[in-house]
Image: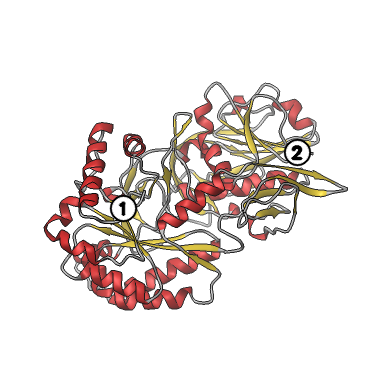
Amino acid sequence: MRLETGIYKSNYPEQADGWRILCEQEKTPFRLTDRPDCTVLLCEGHTPEWLTDYLEEGGVAVLSGVRPEDLPFPTDYIGPASLESADLTELGAGKTRIQSLVQVYDGAGVGMLCLHEKRKIKGGRHPDEYPAVLWQEAGKGGCWYTGIPFSELVCALGDTLRQTPEDSDYSERITAVDKHLLLRAMRRLLAQAYAKRGLPYIYLHYYPEDYRSVFVFRVDVDGVYGDCLEQISAAAKEAGIRVSFYINQALCQEESSRLRAIDSVHDIGCHAREHNLFTTEPENYSNIHDCRVWLKGLGLPLGTGFVAPRGMWNFALNRALWREGISYTSDFGYCVYDLPFYPYEHGRRMEVKQIPVDPFSAERAYAKAKEEMVSLPDEYISERFRKAVRRQYALGMPVILYSHPQCFGRLAGKVFVQLAEELEGKNIWRATMEEFHSWWTGRDHVEYSAFWSEAAGIVVDGILPEKVRVKVVRGGEIGDADGGIKVEGKAQP
């Protein structure tokens, strides 16, 4: 049997863009389809007419953002609800900000939707709490279904000031939707769909060889601030950490000679001419192009990366980046904490990769403390960074941290030493943004097929680069993935 995920191509294929992003992140075999010809089926919104037969014959589907009339079986439909969050703890995602209109169902399932948000519990009563995702058996198969539009939310625009993480004392203007948590839940549902069929789920490992995670530190150079930039460069090199610096022209022009103090072990990228986002593609293009021309004129070794001023992102920016020859960007106004991915614009995959970042920075932390008239001990910055390393490493997700010269410069000597201590003993790849981007691009280009039979087990047919590993999930638990399966194709050196 071929192990292949099908994404239903409805009359509104853009609804499935988030599912395409997930499958591309995973590098699990998949394709768009309008026929019942794949091992597992993913749908958002509309469902196919043949869904009943597909399920009864043993197929398993994950249906998101569905209305009751799109389901091929009767349900206990409650109605639509406008909800700020969903509890997806049972799918490994915890409390997830969705800020969405949701179709609510009652029945057997996982997670929770609470129709009365931010209310005190009185008398031990919990009125109007329903499962977030439900399971329905149908013949030999069945489906997970939910009224949460997982896929469309992954592609949604919009950012806002909010706590990040939600239970912390830190706030930043980041994506209004927890896309990283939605993708985590979607990943779990996909793996469990294969488990429901009694089959393994396979994907390509996210990092070279057997690394558990990747560590990257980035600095947005919104001003040189005397010797602060040089302190960061020197301290990072001394600690064995290579930094990716992104330089803004307008804020660095007066001290441009000091930019040459960035050591050659580090990366340099573009952070725009003006420290702002624009609405149109031509304005964004000019903002990017002018800065790159200026940086090249200074003789700096300019890479292919960019990060958006203020963490803001829109489709016009992504198109402008492609026009300028930029290959990746990293913007917390669009996504945080997650694996890299290529955004989709109304059904079309965009060319410039997004590399999500942890939105915490020393500068915002000090600004927030000043606003609230409280003191902030220097140890707070180091501990926040170290805590982020531990959290992301435990999840097997990338650790991509960032700050600026303004406040971080005077702390860099101590913080980089403590970060190096935190990384010691961990199976983590220390990379630059450029290196991680290049790795992900090569991984994205891999093509392979997978098959399963009782006699042979899993057989993978394809040409895999030497450091790329195939991972296998049995039983639907992502954290239990292993490798060591047979690859029929010749490994690519």
Q: CA distance from mark 1 to mark 2?
A: 44 Å
Residue 40 circle label = none
> Residue 193: percent from the left, percent from the top?
69, 43
Q: Quadrant of the C terminus?
A: bottom right
| Quarter of the image where one finds residue 410 | bottom left
The answer to whether residue 173 of the structure is visible from this angle is yes
Between disc 1 and disc 2, the foreground one is: 1
> Residue 437: percent from the left, percent from the top?
45, 52
Q: Nearer the viewer, residue 64 or 288?
A: 288
Q: Nearer the viewer, residue 178 or 466?
A: 466
Image side of residue 199 versus residue 49, left or right: right
Mark 1 secondary-structure assignment:
loop
- Amino acid carrying label 2: it is Arg
Image side of residue 310 versus residue 325, left or right: left
Residue where numbered disc 1 is placed: 302
Q: Nearer the viewer, residue 2 or 252?
A: 252
The answer to whether residue 166 of the structure is visible from this angle is no
Count neighbours of disc 1 (C-alpha within 10 A) and say few if under 14, some if 14 to 19, many if 20 or more.
some
- Amino acid carrying label 1: it is Leu
User: Above or below — where is 215 with respect to 306?
Assistant: below
Q: Quadrant of the N terminus?
A: top right
Image side of residue 188 versus residue 281, left or right: right
Residue at position x 23%, y 67% in the image: 261
Q: Which comes before the other along the chain, label 1 or label 2?
A: 2
Mark 2 secondary-structure assignment:
loop
Residue at position x 67%, y 55% in the image: 477
Q: Nearer the viewer, residue 272 or 398?
A: 272
Residue at position x 31%, y 49% in the image: 311
> Residue 70: percent from the left, percent from the top?
61, 26
Residue 2 circle label = 2
User: Above or below — where is 310 with respect to 255?
Assistant: above
